[in-house]
């Protein structure tokens, strides 16, 4: 099944050679595209509705690391998030895959970071209604520092070459909580998938705190996707920054209710 998916993905005639600037269709014409350059000073005032809560864990239904020739990803059940809608209902979004980009796709204050990890989610069918987006992506920005336990757990020293895959040992503990801080501040905006067909109406969350990953761990990705001397040389596997157009970007804030620490954002 995985090999079939790899063949299907690699059959698409697109790549990152021009950082997506040559992609057509919605990728070229859409008005709510991702990624964007985030400037904290331009974010909207805060509110206490539409909170996003993280419920990640070490259990996973898949431990297969795949290189589809375009980017590296892992599919599986790594937990879920909830997002509160305008009627104060918490919608449950299940994790579907983790995608790795070098350098980062999003920028902070006009600059990228060395890498970005994007956690894809799809709304739980039991919670689905036509009036709410079906997809959400949570981004974790990565910078050089201490060695990352998370990347050690996915055997980053043995990443598969293009159009191949590796299977992690059955006792692997691929725990997102080892690299995600659930109580961290984050940014929110309405965006898109950052690969063709670039479908829009995707809820995009970007954690503010950059997590550490060692230079050695970055270099394993660089060897597969970067042709230059550092993480910012060549196109890598990242899409270029997109116009914000008329969209607003929101910044979260922490509140405490009855001893429970929450993160809140205002969408409207």
Image (tube, rainbow, N blue to C red):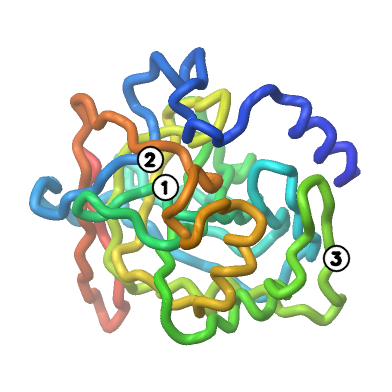
Badge 2 vs badge 1, beta-carbon distance below 8 Å? yes
How far apart are labels 3 and 1 at the CA level?
27 Å
Q: Is residue 169 above or below residue 138?
A: below
Residue in the foreground of this view, choosing between 188 and 13: 13
Local packing at callout 3 (Cα closer than 10 Å; few below 14, some 14-19, many 20+) is: some
Q: CA distance from mark 2 to mark 1?
A: 6 Å
Q: Is residue 34 left or right of residue 179?
A: left
Q: Are marks 3 and 1 in contact (CB under 8 Å)?
A: no
Q: Quadrant of the N terminus?
A: top right
Q: Residue 176 falls in which quadrant of the image?
A: bottom right
Q: Give the residue number, with chain letter if any, for mark 2.
A: 35
Task: State how many labels appear.
Answer: 3
Give the residue pinned by disc 3.
167
Query: Which comes sooner in the sequence, label 2 or label 1?
Result: 2
Horizontal side, residue 211 vs residue 23: left or right: left
Pick the front one: 69 or 7: 69
Q: Who comes first in sequence, dot 3 or dot 1?
A: 1
Report which quarter residue 10 is drawn in: top right
- Mark 3: secondary structure: strand
Residues at marks 3 and 2, CA–CA distance in whole angstroms? 30 Å
Identify the residue shown where x is 52% and y is 67%. Answer: 55
Q: Position of residue 161 (x, y in %)?
A: 78, 55
């Amino acid at each position: 099944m995985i090999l079939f998916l790899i063949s299907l993905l690699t059959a698409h005639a697109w790549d990152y050679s021009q950082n997506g600037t040559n992609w057509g269709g919605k990728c070229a014409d859409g008005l709510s595209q991702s990624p964007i350059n985030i400037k904290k000073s331009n974010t909207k005032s805060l509110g206490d509705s539409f909170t996003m809560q993280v419920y990640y864990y070490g259990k996973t239904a898949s431990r297969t690391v795949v290189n589809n020739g375009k980017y590296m990803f892992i599919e599986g059940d790594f937990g879920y998030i909830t997002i509160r809608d305008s009627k104060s209902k918490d919608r449950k979004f299940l994790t579907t895959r983790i995608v790795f980009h070098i350098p980062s796709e999003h920028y902070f204050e006009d600059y990228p970071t060395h890498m970005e990890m994007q956690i894809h989610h799809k709304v739980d069918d039991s919670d689905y209604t036509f009036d709410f987006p079906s997809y959400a992506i949570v981004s974790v920005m990565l910078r050089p520092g201490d060695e990352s336990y998370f990347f050690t757990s996915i055997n980053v020293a043995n990443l598969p070459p293009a159009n191949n895959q590796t299977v992690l040992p059955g006792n692997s503990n691929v725990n997102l909580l080892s690299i995600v801080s659930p109580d961290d501040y984050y940014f929110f905006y309405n965006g898109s998938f950052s690969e063709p067909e670039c479908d829009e109406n995707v809820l995009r969350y970007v954690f503010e705190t950059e997590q550490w990953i060692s230079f050695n761990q970055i270099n394993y990705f660089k060897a597969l996707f970067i042709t230059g001397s550092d993480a910012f040389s060549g196109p890598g596997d990242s899409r270029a920054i997109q116009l914000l157009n008329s969209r607003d970007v929101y910044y979260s804030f922490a509140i405490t209710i009855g001893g429970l620490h929450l993160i809140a954002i205002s969408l409207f």
